[in-house]
Image: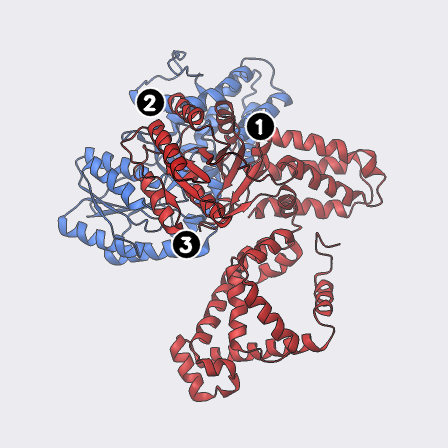
Amino acid sequence: MLENLTGRLQGVIKNLRGQARMTEDNVADAMREVRMALLEADVALPVVKEFIINVKARAQGQDVLQSLTPGQAVIQVVHDELTALMGKANVALNLAVVAPAIILMAGLQGSGKTTTSAKLAKLLKEQKKKVLLASADVYRPAAIEQLKTLAKQLEVDCFDSNASQKPCDIAAATLDFAKRHFYDVIIFDTAGRLGIDEAMMAEIKALHAQLNPVETLFVVDAMQGQDAVNTAKAFGDTLPLSGVILTKLDGDARGGAALSVRHITGKPIKFIGVSEKVDGLEPFHPERMASRVLGMGDVLSLIEQAQKNVDIDEAKKLAEKIKSGKNFDLDDFKAQMVQMRNMGGMGALMDKMPAQMSGMAAKMNTADAEKSMRRIEGIINSMTPLERRKPELIKATRKRRIAMGSGVEVQEVNRVLNQFEETQKMMKMFSKGGGMAKMMRGMQGMMGGKLPGMR
Amino acid sequence: MFDFFKKNSPGSNPVKSSLTERLKQGLSKTRQQFSSQLASLFGGGKIDADVYDELETILLTSDVGVAATQYLLDQLKQSVKRENLQDTTELKAALKAALLELLTPLEYPLTINEQKPFVIMMVGVNGAGKTTTIGKLANLFQAQGKSVLIAAGDTFRAAAREQLQVWGERNNVHVVAAESGDPAAVIFDAINSAKAKNIDIVLADTAGRLPTQMHLMDEIAKVKRVIDKAHAGAPHEILLVLDANTGQNAVMQVKAFDDALKVSGLVLSKLDGSAKGGVIAAIAQARPIPIRYIGIGETMDDLREFKAADFVDALFDA
């Protein structure tokens, strides 16, 4: 995500860091680079202009000039301004109204409204809300069908509308149904429409008036170009938007829309869509995104992701084993890998790492790494429970059987066993020596710097 | 805002076919945006640095991109020097010429050869408009007296199959679909069915995918290989559908899909809503692949062949 922008800005930062003194010239040079980087990333031109003016003004101010490390101070200014551009802090959904709380989804064709509706439903369901999905997209063939199918997958209820109904009738019926069945939240999906299509804009305005939603969310494709300004304006003028959801951010190495959409609409980005899967919706944190854009990583999100996806019992069991230094077997070895995959795999993890670390990781191909992890899992799966507990049992004949079972060569089985032994040794070291703290110090030394957010 | 019925100044476009008119209507937003800014700029006066700065802004906000904008400005400065242009009104013709020169290589319409069936594979990111474009293409080919079969190769997205089936019913086209499963298998079946029925054209839909998802890019390369197995030499055309609203990311999409599949043509969809179509200039520079069609509206016949001159004219004439 955002690699292009990050890469270019890092060049600028590297340059600035080395500067002993800030002059008008080197600030201007840096800002020219930043401007190009932002434009290449599809950040809207008016936003770029204002951003540059703000940063320039502050970079030539007293705080920076009197700083001992002016380069660092300018970077801090850029970081602050980026955060400000994206809206300072995370803004959560406001559902504190008399049930049902209604969420209205609006946006261009193909921006991802239907998929996002389903993702949002899943998120709210996890918060123990009783959610009803409903679609008033009577124009695109099978759009309602799409939402129904997704709802079924998620085990969320979907209002039974069909394409022969009028959108306003669907709205009225949905509202009635939700009230009678005591739903907490209605997520109301609408057809994609162009900002310049007056008839369609009038329709959604009427729907809004009828439903009186507590949240009106504007769904924007992160890959949108400079026209995002006009689209956002058209929707903002028609509807009292309460927030924005940025979709397809995983596909974009630029993500300029993330930087400009808040500025244009004046509404907070509440969520970002980061994967095709139904759980690929994350709350948006401007300060974390700014860190990410500047290559400083997003360790906070990483930790949250870990908390959400890691099986706590499993992790505790593993921690116990590590502590005792005994009984770490192949099943645990496999469990570790499964945990890692549950967190979205290597790619997703690396994405949130600080640039120094992900730079290190870039040398190894994450896709290949994931593939080899899957293979290791396959090999372990081909072992009997006894073999997994007592790997020392595995001799030539068993190795051959395991290799056949998992469709690999015997050498690969050997490699996995070696790897496991190495890990086992490391685990023992853990339990003996100073434990975790010592290990962490060692790792920090390796990375040559502090992790951001850890002071 | 909706002043596309406004009379255009005569003489700017000698051949006023209905097609040009339609394109202009579709592009009216683009044109309005672009030309209202240009009109004030080209209204006459001395050519100075401010004019170039202004022009740069206009090109950038039209999604032309940094590299292509720089290129166009350099071209412009050269011709100003060479032809000793003095007035900004002369700049307009020069900019038009530079843009036309950049875009003309992309004007290369799709020709359906004697291959039977002629297999067209549709690819693109999520929400680009692949399925809608397939509907429009089916309609277009049928109007040309060709028999068409659609393969519902998007087995991933919920109800993608149903969406195509509705399109198929409207056009009276047979849609080959499977409950779920492997996209390559569905398309393989469709091609065999087309062979048996002596169908002229097979339109193969595929699921939307972002070029950053390596496993999905691998999958689509496999789909292409399987198509070749079903019918040697196929697919005869690989169309990448691009959303005209997309910014510089479109260039990355073209590169990624081309690297994986060797894309033979582009379709620029949703040009009716976009205030710009400028990204094609960036594409023309980075990876010149012919633009076969442009989508300029929501109805069935709103799919047109790309004409560079019409496109540039529509952009500039107000």
Left or right: A209 as drawn, with respect to A166? right
Mark closer to the chain start, 1 or 3: 1
Looking at this view, name the residue that lies furthest to the left.
B197
**In the depicted view, which residue is nearer to us: A181 or B226?**
A181
Can residue B239 be seen from the camera position used here? no
Mark closer to the chain start, 1 or 2: 2
Residue at point 29% right, 30% down?
A165
What is the letter of the red chain? A
Residue that numbered label 2 is attached to: B22
Question: Is label 2 in a helix, a strand or a loop?
Answer: helix
Left or right: A20 as drawn, with respect to A99? right
The image position of residue A176, as x and y in percent, is 37, 32
The image position of residue A75, as x and y in percent, is 73, 43
The correct choice, above or below, for B92 with respect to A244 in the image is above
Please report, as a chain letter, where disc 3 is located.
B
Residue that numbered label 3 is attached to: B216
What is the letter of the blue chain? B
Q: How is the image coloured?
A: by chain
- How far apart marks 1 and 2 lie (CA) works out to 29 Å
Task: Report the mark closest to the observer, 1 or 2.
Answer: 2
3 and 2 marks in contact (CB < 8 Å): no
